[in-house]
Image: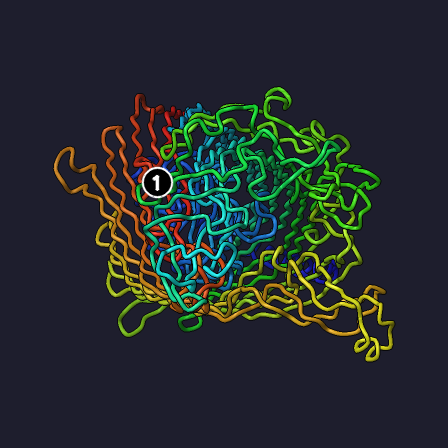
Amino acid sequence: MSHPQFRISLLAMSVAMLLSATAQAQTTQQAATAKTAEQEVERLEIRGIAASNKQNLNNKRFSEQVVDTITAEDLGKLPDVTITDTLQRIPGVQIRRSAGEGSTVNVRGMPQVTTLLNGEQFLSAGSLTTVQPDFTDIPSALIAGIDVLKSPMANVLSGGISGTLDLKTWRPLDLKPGSTFAFNTELTRGSLSKENDGKVSLFGGYKSDDEKFAAVMTLSYDQNNLANYLNGAILNAMEVIGENEKDKRDFNGDKDNNDTFFTQRYYGVMDRTTERDRIGANASVQYVLSDTLTLTADLFHTQMDDADRKQGLMVDSARGNNWAYSDQFIPRADGPLGGNIYTVSEALYQVRRVSAYSESLTNDRESTNINLQLDFDNKDNFSGSVRYLRGDASRDHTENVAHAYVTSGAQHGLMRNVGNGVEPVNPRGYGPADIPVQFSRGGKYIRLSYPQGFAQDIKRTNLVSTYSENNFHEEATLDVLRADGKYAFELGDIQSVSFGLRTAKRDVERDTFILVAPFKTGNLSADVMWKDSGASLGDTNGDGVANVALGDLTLGRAWYFDELPAGWVHQVNGFGPASSDSFYLINPKALDNPFASQNQLYPGNKKLSDPAKSYGVTQTDHSAYLKLDLDGELGSLPYQANIGAQYIKTDLEILQNLVGSARPCSLCTAAIKAGEEQINRDDDTVLPSANLRLDLSDELILRAAYGKTMTNLDFSKLAGGVSVGRTRAGDVLAKEYGVSPDLLVAVSGRQNGNPLLEPWRSTNYNLGLEWYYDSASLVSVGLFRMNIDSFIEKGQVMKGLPDIDGVVRREVPVDTEINGKGGTVKGVEVTWQQSFDFLPGVWSGLGTTLNYTYAPSDSANKDVYGATLPIQDNSENSGNAVLWYEKDGLQLRVAANYRSDRLDSLAIPLGKGVVPIWTQSTVYVDASASYDLFDHSSVYLQVSNLTGEFENNYAQWRDHVIYQNVYEKRWTLGWRSRF
């Protein structure tokens, strides 16, 4: 898996480069020192909104490529609460939220965005398999600034289809001589969680008087409890029920049976809370070894323990008859039976099953990234650097579910038998009649209304099923060695050449497992994952038929809520603004430790590996780049440009498991590992790029850029188990392959990851005009286009799979993900930034930033009517409006972020395509205020989601909302000191 020859060669070239440059430096050192002594070093200290905005414009104006930047307003203070909340203020950037906090980022509609740390790759523990981190891992206090690079450049690490994010930490040598300290503490309270959360961050820095040594350290700790309610569809399962099916009911009363009802299977209300304990540490040391050499060492550490907990009441049709009764059926489209497809907004649901559902998902994740860097500058015409980076990260993930019944189970025929005869699985539950539940999606919130007194008796709810699956342990390592150089000279308009070599190796291993416990019913015994008191291990009474209704024994026992261990059950009063209902539910905190909770109910649990979801991937990249920098005139207009190319050779080693149909357990999702498959592949790519900046005047800049981009796939898309479907060979195949007719031969397969998937590739174009009409103001217009080669979609490939005897005799169809048709994203970004410092008196502290992005896109997918669907999670229209004020120690800011409707996901096939799930447009408003009480101390107040915005998600039709994510408003009071 390693390539020692390449690494030795790279290191040798790096050393040779520095030795050669050092020799040259000896002849120029004296002149360079004299020149430096004559220069006055200017240091810009960023404090406050206005200074931060001014620095952002300065960075953008003099950049070599299309870029937008964010600069911290003070030590440990980005403009918004989180990194992603800050990023969403950039034109073309859209974010996805997790429990109300921003977690991931799209640039110009695409999530394939590489994120760098100080210009290089790093590992984030929340997303070990992807090139973009989970930003909830990273405390914002560790970050000094962010560059959003929207056009590629040869010397910038490839990886982002639409853009690259470069997170910047504090550089010690940028400090003033002496000591610098900053302290920040916060208290936050959520409007729905009603919890008081805290945050503390510390910054310490020192720079020697001779300015040759400097060090900084930033520490951050915060704890958050975030409330996020879910109304409507609890699980994403849809049904299309024809009038000629099941109960054959003419549901819309038109005297025929050719219509179809489209519905969700599950509706309900869920109280969802997320608890996050987050630690971050960043340390950096810089030492000027000589006039030509500077050594830098960085440590970047993040650690987060989190629990996503869910609890609520859920109703479902239990795959039964059409459960909706209404006089308001809405015709939507032509149906498969010759009539129409109908939906309802108001209905009486005759519910067959009502469940009390609780779930806990936990993560313990940690990452450490180390950077060692030696920079060289001979103060004349050559500069360069050698860097080594090491990243280590791990993640432990658990999932634990408790599924209780409020209804008896008789409504859909789920019975139990522990030796005392057959009875409903929840004998004390409501039934056997269906439960009438009034359903409405016509108001602001989806609402369910239950019969008076329903589910108010704790003794009538029974924990029927519990299980723990999709648990995994994941580890990753990253090693990077690179050397970069720049040689300045004049050859016509060519001013310098930049060049570099890089090798990187990333290893990821994932071991997925379930928890099983031993059960015995009658003469049958097995390890079981789904501990379901309505399930049977098989034919326990020996009549040759496995059927509980005919007397077979079931496993487990009845766990009524009043009999569960202490602390398991509590009463939840209210489910956010949509519901004031009160129900008895299992506290999901009791499920945080799957081993402990499962053993409390059914002792003897053990881990059982799930080979279909376990894998290992090693990716080794060797790359080289060459970039020419130009500076001259086109006619009478000054210009600057760079052209270059990056060559990348990628080697992939993918280890995935072969699994058969046999299972090592009963009532479980794991399969027996039948073998391993090692796939080795390589890929060579050349990525050309060009950037042009033309000064039309002192204030007006024209930019143009071209480049090819590539993003490596999420490792989970490349690797995973291959399940083999087998059947008896029969006479035909037996004769063709010379085997026994009774041999089980492979006929189909399912592959969780496709190792032959090609990476994301795109050809990008940028054209922009920027008008800097004063030092703090800008009007800009940018056009962009991305021609994306292909999107990842579901499909089939032909693959040789082994028969039961281990011999591969033929290729069979395998369901997996494939490279489908490509698409185009194009659009325009418009920005206006204005400081009103020319106004008189108090009005001179005003400023504003407005931006708008129009980014239509298309894909190969079609909706129910055959209309082309856009790229997922891309809003065609998005924008930001920020109004700020800063004067005499007072800082105020109100920021609004708008996103138009966006495609969230694709559901079942229907009509002329598939059912698209859309998220309706949103406007999130945040506000902040701070006041300098003393020269070096300030108090501040921040409000996130000031208006209580929430997300409506609809299926195909905008009035057909199927679920809602309700986020809370959060208030933060803080104190900041710097000295």
Q: Residue 326: image x %, image y %?
A: 36, 48
Question: What count of labels does the image hold?
Answer: 1
The residue that appears at 60% across and 55% down in the rendered structure is: 22
- Answer yes or no: is residue 514 visible: no
Q: Residue 744: image x %, image y %?
A: 81, 66
Figure coloring: rainbow
Check the picture and name the quadrant holding the N terminus: bottom right
The image quadrant of residue 429 is top right
The residue that appears at 73% across and 37% down in the rendered structure is: 555
Read off the residue under disc 1: 445
Q: Residue furthest bottom?
A: 736
Q: Amino acid at mark 1?
A: Tyr
Say what secondary structure mark 1 lies in: loop
Q: Is residue 902 left or right of residue 307?
A: left
Which residue is at the front of the view, 728 or 664?
Answer: 728
Q: Residue 3: image x %, image y %?
A: 73, 60
Q: Residue 906: image x %, image y %?
A: 47, 58
Check the picture and name the quadrant holding the C terminus: top left
The residue that appears at 25% across and 58% down in the rendered structure is: 771
Q: Is residue 454 left or right of residue 515?
A: left
Which residue is at the front of the view, 417 or 840?
Answer: 417
- Answer yes or no: is residue 400 visible: yes
Which residue is at the front of the view, 143 or 244?
Answer: 244
The image quadrant of residue 367 is top right
Q: Residues within 10 Å of mark 1 (few under 14, many from 20)?
A: some
